[in-house]
Structures are given as C-alpha cells and as structure tokens.
Image (tube, rainbow, N blue to C red):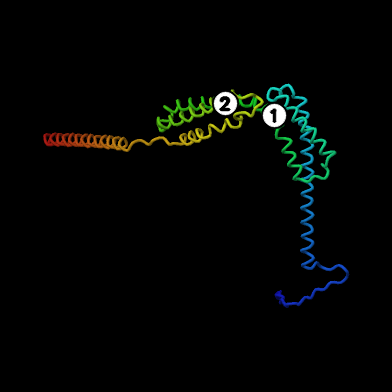
Amino acid sequence: MIRRRKKVHRRTLSVETYYTGRIQPYSEDTMNYSQAKLQELARKDHERILLEEAKNKYESSFYSIRSKLSEDDEVLSLVSTEEQRSEVLKMAEDAEDWMYYEGGDTADLETYEKRYEELMAPAQAIFTRLAEYTARPEAIKALNAKLAQIEELMSKWETSKPQVTEDERTSVLDKVSNVRKWVADQEEEQAGKELWEEPAFLSTDVPKQTKSVETLIGKLSKKPKPKPEKKKKEEKKNETETNSTDSSAEDDSEAKEEKVMDDEEKSDEGLKDDEEL
C-alpha cells in the first residue's frame, strides 16, 4: 500500500485586534505613570524600613549603654573616670527622653543616624579601652612568639635551604628587628598614658607589623634549589666514556687472545694429523 504525502498549504492572514467592554489595555502614557508610581511606593517602603531599623538601633543603644555601665562598673572603672561614665550615662538618659517625649516620633532617618553616632562615640571609646586592656598584651605575646619562630626558621634554612643566601636571611632578620623595635616603642608610649586615655595603639595594629616579613619569607621559600653544575656533569660523562672505552679495549684484547689460542690449537691438531699420516 502506497501512502501519499499530504500537501501543506500556507497562507498569510491579516489579524485585526479590537477590545470590547470597559477594560482597555494601557496606553504608553498610562504605563509610564503606573511604573513611576510603583517605583515611588517602593522607595517610600525602603525608607520606612530603614527608619524603623534606625529607631530600633537607637533605642537598643541607650538601653545597652545603661546596662553595661551598671553591670560592669567595677571593670569599667579601670579604663574610665567617674566623670566619663557619668557623662555617658547622662547622654543615654537624654537619648531616651528625646525618643519618647521630645520629637523622636517625627524625626527622619538622617536625624536618627546622626544622634546614634553622637551617643555611641564616647561610650564606644570606653568599651574599646576595656577590650584593649586584655587584647593588647595577648596580641603582643602572639607577635613575639611568631617572631621567635621566624628566627628559628632562618637558623634551619642555613642547612635545609642552601639556595637562600646569607644576605637574604639577614634581610628577614632585619625586618624582625624592626618589628621588635616597633613593639618596644609602642609599649613605652602606652606606659606613659593613663588607662582612661586614648590608647597608643590597638591590638588590631599588632598582626599587621609582620606582613612584609611574611611576604618575604613566602617568596624565599619558593626559591628553587640550584641545579648541578654543567662541569660536573661533563666530568662524569667523560669518566663513563673512558670506562666504556677501556672495557671495549679489554674485550677486544681478550677476543684476540682467544682467537690466537684457537689458531694454535688448530695448528697443533694439524701437525698431529700429519705425523699420523
């Protein structure tokens, strides 16, 4: 049975659209207006969210300040004066009054952000000094341990890494000496300050001092070992060739001697045969 392929006829149709009823498609102007309105609503929602977050942060800040001053008064007295703590506490109380009774409800985002910075600056200075009271000595201790490890490593490299020259190891040790001098200078300056004054340095400054020396050590550690000298390779090659030549000569000599002995034996056998004949 033979199946015939169906012939496909294609024709271009003209379509005309029209709408009935009260609902009509947006015009270009209407669409632009609607998009602008939606964008404006989204912007206002975003600002409202930011304002609520700023209010919550501001409110929690003065509660947190009062709580820390009350609970940690004994340790905070090590790094602040009575006058400093009283000033911070007064600022927290004033912040609470302003937010609840003096215009906090109508203040905008910029106002809340500015008042938060003004409130937290003196309080954060006290809390930072308290944290640094223990953090600085720990950071210095860790730094000195690292410097000792670097010095020990340079001593080991004298034998384990001959490719690192003495001048390069000395350069590393010079950087270590510079770091030790920085530590000594900073500790001396800090010793001349009262604990309630701005510290001479922070614990976060300490680890940064070994950045350059660690970079140099990383570079030197990747330095490849020196390759054997070409001269030594050639001498070894010549020795091998000489040994090979001597061996070949000995083999040739032995072969010649064996051949002579074989010829003599054959000659003797020939004489014996002649004598018998």
* Residue depicted at 68% across the width and 31% down the height: 125
Q: Nearer the viewer, residue 264 or 27?
A: 27
Q: Nearer the viewer, residue 156 or 196?
A: 196
Q: Which quadrant would residue 206 be assigned to in this image?
A: top right
Mark 2, residue position: 189
Is residue 136 positioned above or below 43 on the image?
above
Q: Secondary structure at mark 1?
A: helix
Picture disc at residue 215: none
| Amino acid residing under circle 1 | Ile
| Amino acid residing under circle 2 | Glu
In this rendering, position of residue 277 left or right of residue 112 = left
Q: Which quadrant would residue 266 be assigned to in this image?
A: top left
Is residue 208 positioned above or below 39 on the image?
above
* Residue depicted at 76% across the width and 35% down the height: 61
Mark 1, residue position: 126
* Crowd tier of the residue under label 1, counting other residues whose Cα lies within 10 Å: few below 14, some 14–19, many 20 or above: many
Q: Secondary structure at mark 2?
A: helix
